[in-house]
Image (cartoon, helix red, strand yellow):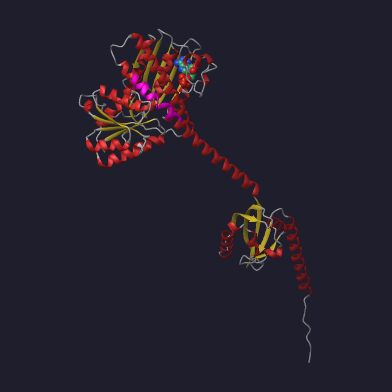
Amino acid sequence: MSFTAPIIDIGDAIDAAAARQAIRESEERFRTLASHAPVGIYLTDPSGDCLFVNKTWCRMTGLTPEEARGKGWVKAVHPDDRERVAAEWYDAALRRRPFAGEYRYLRPDGVVTWLQASAVEYQSAEGKIAGHIGSVVDITARKQAEFALKEAKEQAEAANRSKDRFLAVLSHELRTPLTPVLMSVAARLMDPDLSPDLRDELTMIRRNVELETKLIDDLLDLSRITSGKLALRPQVVDLNDAVRHVCSICRDQILEKSIKLRCELDANAGEVTADPARLQQVLWNVLKNAAKFTPDGGQIELMTRRQEGDRVSIRVADTGAGIAPEMLPRVFDAFEQGDPRVSREFGGLGLGLAITKSLVELHQGAIRVQSDGPGRGCVFTIEFPARPAPVAHAKPRSPDAKANRLRLLIVEDHADTAMVLRKLLSASGYHVKTAACAASAMQMIEQEPFDLLISDIGLPDWNGYELMKRIRAAHAIRGIAMSGFGMDEDIRKSREAGFADHLVKPVNVAQLHDVIRRVSAAPVV
Ligand code: ADP
């Protein structure tokens, strides 16, 4: 019997010992690194079950390494995130995909920490999957800052919404009583036998009520512009027609001061794409300022010009108060009036030009001002993109006798407004009936024919939208909404209910006549 001693290659043995030593050192390095790292570190087996966690992980979670082992680590996750995170983790391990996520730990002492976790698989020396190595970073401070920011944003948005609603309600309440005043005054002023004194007084009352309305409108417009809620209703508009119309609106103010108005309208000015009401507001603001700041006997020059490159311009030059050089860059700022004497003498809030500039820019236009200084007049120039090929469109129908035989039903619970509207429209030849609530309006419509409904929105029983919807369901009657609420949302609701137009109180008589004519001439859809 012979024994053969195993042959050990000394060289191999030394290599193996060196390799074991190297592994030990490497593991030691990893442990030192892991236990001093400021982030939580964990190792798992290939299935995703925990093999090792470092000290930081234990501090973050309040669990011991033994408690974390296997599936124990799941207990560290906040109950609200636990199921989702465990499912995502084991799914990533199964599919051998990297894992990343943000979730919460709930420590046994009740402290909640937000963390960002990520893990990748690591392989053995033979290239087989050995498990996963992951890290968790405490992001509680960042999350708290994000939540605080989100909360502050939500609070600011809610405050903004309440402010918008408050402004809308306030303007409604302020406008409603102005309507009967404006309309009565307008009706009285139509009387040719009025004594000059009374005419002057009524004109003064009308001017002041209109001023009040303008202030309310300006505040509302400014709020819509700053909140980005001003929506345009663009149409094709003939620029010269728009300028002529604004001249006719300002005529009295200009005549009163014996100002000479010279208009030079370029026959090729053509058309622009604009919201007609907003374009009128822009031109009116500038022309009315020119009239306001030009002394008696002065001159205003109004010019339209087709420019190179398909732009069109409107130039309003006056020989009035002029603007000091230091004020020039600020005239388009909100609440800016330059000299405080201006507000005392002329009133206003200094919003007109700020709103004008925003409206012009919303139309892709530009506005600028020049002045050689106080007492030397000023020139406002407004430019808009012109429509390349003017399209002929039908002129609005002129009023005819037939239109005045229209049968109108006014639904208005504000007794003074209803009374003045009835008087005024009857005087213009319309057949007018009034109802103080939606139910009695509905009853009247069942009993006699009407062509047009003019209805308030806030009514004691159903609102005006509901009334219009019910009428449209059974009758071919067009409707005009008349409301103290004039936000875009209110106008949209009116359209949806079936109203052909939406007038904001206080309604000016000429505007009401225009809208009645336009709406009654359009086919019922
Ligand atoms: P408001 O809305 O109060 O009328 P605006 O914004 O329209 O104010 O105008 C702001 C200021 O710009 C006026 O208070 C006035 O100082 C100056 N301004 C505007 N237009 C003219 C003008 N044509 N001539 C002289 N100053 C003007």
Where in the figure is residue 160, as x and y percent of width and height? Answer: 51, 36
Name the outermost residue toward the top.
297
Q: Quadrant of the C terminus?
A: top left
- The quarter of the picture where residue 125 lies is bottom right
Q: Which one is in front, 170 or 350?
A: 170
Asked if the stretch drawn in magenta spans residue 172, the answer is yes
- In the figure, residue 266 lies in which quadrant? top left
Q: Is residue 110 above or below residue 184?
A: below
Q: Residue at x 52, y 37 (%)?
A: 159
Does the magenta run of residues contain 392? no
Q: Nearer the viewer, residue 430 or 293?
A: 430
Q: Point out the image quarter for the N terminus.
A: bottom right
Picture residue at 21% right of the left edge, 24% below the top:
400
Provide residue 222's location: percent of width, then percent of height: 47, 28
Q: In the image, is residue 498 above or below residue 406? A: below
Q: Please report the bounds of the magenta region as a residue range.
A: 170-184
Q: Nearer the viewer, residue 428 or 435?
A: 435
Residue 134, position as x, y percentages in the image:
65, 59
